[in-house]
């Protein structure tokens, strides 16, 4: 089957990809957007979003994403559901394979495949996401006002999320699988000085239990004694890191050591001319819906310039001046 030729393909439909789609469609670039297994991205896993500007009373995550998608469609973006199985970035037009069989050629690409919060993979965990289990303190902390909650992990994210959550929760217990923390000294100290933070070290989480379809407790194995314990709690924040969704790139773009795509200066240009990256796939630091949307806008503007014929180098230099 012949490949379909496009000026722009956008891979991923979180706030970054959808904002890029809105801007690119309005610029008549007729983007084709590929939405993978998690259309709408991480926001579809959360409930109410209260910090996205413009929604005074908040908006449900899935609704926000549906609105962005509808807005992109209104301006002419096309959507296809599928999983990008491989890309060939060695020459232009780039080659994109979806679901191992659908072939596309694109003059430019925006990679906005996001990052996925890592989960423990224990029983009860994914079933109770949004019902007491969360991977995002900034998104969901507010719902745990005056509640006793657990934060799982021993890295900087766990320290940061636990500290942040003490603004809402009555007590936050950090649960870590070793008796030594991975977090930086500064972040550890800040958490240790917080009177609302308690510690449960050297335990392995085994299972999340529910009652009335909400989190009721976490079962853990005490690594020292070998005994199992049930810790009653109203909320569990899993903070064991994120993984950028970049495996399909097969190492063709420059990434950092964790796998986040490296972009050039203040632009969204990647190490391959004509390929741009935005959102959590290139941002391990801010990871907010609004910052992802902002970088999606930048990517679409960068693509527009690129397709007009200016080289990445020219405009990344001029933008720094
Ligand atoms: P991380 O440093 O990789 O730490 C992940 C933590 O989760 C580790 O303590 C690890 O335990 C634990 N863990 C991993 N898999 C687990 C499992 N299956 N079961 C139980 N525990 C598990 O990830 P991160 O904390 O997200 O930080 C990522 C990067 O972002 C780091 O470079 C960090 O410095 C940076 N960061 C910086 C800030 C800041 O400066 N404000 C804030 C957040 C993140 P082990 O220790 O036993 O491996």
Image: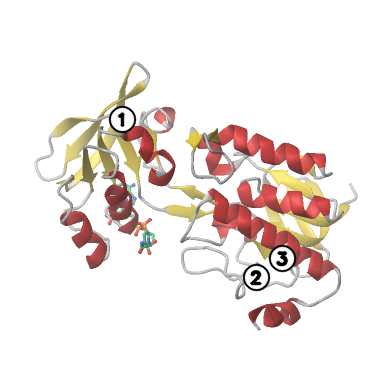
> In the rendered structure, which disc, 2 or 3, sits on the residue that comes first in sequence?
2
In the drawing, does residue 142 fall left or right of residue 243? left
Q: For marks 2 and 3, give the CA distance.
A: 12 Å
Does the residue tagged 1 have its C-beta within 8 Å of any atom of ligand 1?
Answer: no
Which tag is nearer the camera, tag 2 or tag 1? 2
For the residues bearing labels 2 and 1, Cβ distance under 8 angstroms:
no
Location of residue 85 in the rendering, given as x and y in whole percent from the top left corner: 67, 50
Is residue 52 at least partly visible in the picture? yes
Residue at image x 36%, y 28%?
124
> In the rendered structure, which disc, 3 or 1, sits on the residue that comes first in sequence?
1
Residue tagged 2 = 267
Which tag is nearer the camera, tag 2 or tag 3? 2
Does the residue tagged 2 have its C-beta within 8 Å of any atom of ligand 1?
Answer: no
> In the rendered structure, which disc, 2 or 1, sits on the residue that comes first in sequence?
1
Residue at image x 41%, y 42%?
135
Residue tagged 1 = 208
In the drawing, does residue 29 fall left or right of residue 296? right
Quarter holding the C terminus is: bottom right
Q: For marks 2 and 1, give the CA distance.
A: 42 Å
């Amino acid at each position: 089957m012949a490949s379909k030729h496009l000026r722009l393909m956008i891979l991923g439909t979180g706030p970054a990809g959808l904002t890029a789609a809105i801007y690119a469609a309005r610029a008549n670039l007729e983007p084709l957007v590929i939405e993978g297994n998690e259309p709408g991205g991480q926001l579809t896993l959360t409930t109410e979003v209260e910090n996205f500007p413009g929604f005074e009373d908040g908006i449900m995550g899935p609704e926000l994403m549906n609105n962005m998608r509808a807005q992109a469609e209104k301006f002419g973006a096309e959507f296809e559901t599928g999983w990008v199985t491989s890309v060939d970035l060695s020459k232009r037009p780039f080659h994109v394979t979806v679901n191992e069989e659908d072939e596309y050629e694109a003059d430019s690409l925006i990679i906005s495949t996001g990052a996925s919060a890592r989960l423990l993979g224990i029983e009860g965990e994914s079933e109770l996401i949004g019902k007491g289990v969360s991977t995002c303190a900034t998104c969901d902390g507010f719902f745990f006002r005056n509640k006793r909650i657990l934060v799982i992990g021993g890295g900087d994210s766990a320290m940061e999320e636990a500290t942040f959550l003490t603004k809402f929760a009555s007590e936050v217990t950090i649960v870590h699988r070793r008796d030594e923390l991975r977090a930086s000294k500064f972040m550890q100290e800040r958490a240790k000085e917080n009177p609302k933070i308690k510690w449960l070290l050297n335990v392995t989480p085994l299972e999340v239990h529910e009652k009335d379809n909400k989190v009721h407790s976490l079962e853990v194995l005490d690594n020292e004694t070998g005994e199992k314990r049930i810790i009653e709690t109203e909320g569990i924040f899993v903070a064991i890191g994120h993984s950028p969704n970049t495996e399909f790139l097969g190492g063709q773009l420059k990434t950092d050591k964790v796998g986040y795509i490296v972009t050039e200066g203040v632009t969204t240009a990647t190490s391959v001319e004509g390929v741009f990256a935005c959102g959590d796939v290139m941002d391990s630091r801010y990871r907010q819906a609004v910052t992802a949307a902002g970088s999606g806008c930048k990517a679409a503007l960068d693509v527009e310039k690129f397709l007009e014929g200016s080289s990445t180098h020219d405009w990344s230099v001029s933008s720094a001046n």
